[in-house]
Amino acid sequence: MKQYDVYGIGAALLDTECRVSDQFLETAGIEKGVMTLVDEKRQSEILISLAASENDFVRKCGGSVCNSIVAAGLLGSDTFFSGKVANDADGNIFIRELAAAGVDFHSVKSEAGVTGKCLVMITVDAERTMNTFLGASAQLSKREIDDSALLNSEWLYIEGYLATSIKHTEMAADIIKFAKASSVKVALSLSDPFVVEAYADNLRQIIGTGVDHIFCNKAEAIAFTGTSNEDEAASDLCKYSISHVVTSGADGARCFDGEHMIFSQGIEVDAIDTNGAGDMFAGAFLFAITSGKSYQWAADFANVCASMVVKKFGPRLDKDDFEMLKDQYELR
């Protein structure tokens, strides 16, 4: 048996989340519903504007794969995360929060610059809009990868956001080749419609000859495959991965387990914040399949977890929520 169930690699960011109006996004020239990379100055300008409106901010360690790794860890998986933070207060907060979640972490701290930050703005329709300053995460390299821990992991999980730079595209592709050659299964998230539309070629380079599993939502699946509907997209994804999940929020999820297409019924809830829903789904799903559960069980459970997180403000569930889930599903 391997030491770790899931080894994650991705951006190490400190998330700042707040509520905004559609009017604010329009006035500030911010594209709604996607992730946009910005520089530190631009992010600071937006934060100053938000502070002037007496906004309440929620701050947590974040990054897409990081959120998933924390979720899997708090559900009971043995997890490891590699990212890059700076030697500053935000970097120390990030490391402390991962440790509190029971996640093993490896990073070579950057002495220059600052820890990356993601500004997450939630509108009244629960849609999340992200402006990300990568900071030290832009310097993520193979120095942050613990080869011993990776080789001792059942799954490697990588975020598609790495496709936004050539350097990280090449790094991710090399790490995936190394993992596959070492019999470590590989999962990839397509991450965001913006990433898929702008960096599809880089994503294909990362995937290479194929991965074991892809996580994506309906919009990402259609954009990546160039198809016209969800059914065609789900079928086309089989060219790139052995299995996959295409999520559609309350409309459920289509899951291909390598042999059969499975449908998992969605859960209708009054959502107030969709930030972190996909990350929660992926973390819960990876926890389930590394615990020996079927893909049907994993998808159903992940839908439950995602439906819980969208009812809260913030990207993750509280520890008490995870304890309740473990009791309800007899996961101890």
Image (spheres, grey):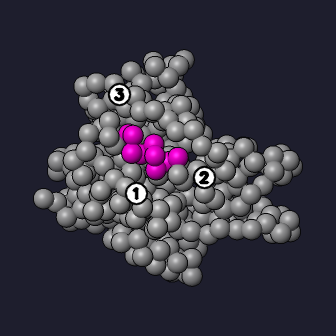
Magenta region's main secondary structure? Answer: helix
Q: Which residue is mark 2?
A: 311
The answer to whether residue 329 is visible is yes
Query: Between tags 1 and 3, which lies in front?
Result: 1
Q: Say whether residue 148 is left or right of residue 84.
A: left
Q: Earlier in the sequence, mark 3 or mark 2?
A: 3
Measured as percent of width and height from the top left, residue 67 is found at: 47, 59
- For image coordinates 35% across by 60% down, the residue present is 327
- For image coordinates 40% across by 52% down, the residue present is 283
Residues under labels 1 and 3: Cα distance? 23 Å
Q: Say whether residue 23 is left or right of residue 6.
A: right
Measured as percent of width and height from the top left, residue 64 is found at: 49, 54
Front-most of residues 216 and 264: 264
Label 3 packing within 10 angstroms: few (<14), some (14-19), many (20+): some
Measured as percent of width and height from the top left, residue 231 is found at: 46, 19
Q: Is residue 74 magenta?
A: no
Which image quarter is the N terminus in?
bottom left
Q: Which residues are magenta?
A: 299-307
Label 1 packing within 10 angstroms: few (<14), some (14-19), many (20+): some
Give the residue at the far left of this rendering: 1
- For image coordinates 37% across by 32% down, the residue present is 255
Q: Which residue is mark 1?
A: 325
The answer to whether residue 69 is visible is no
Q: Which residue is mark 3?
A: 262
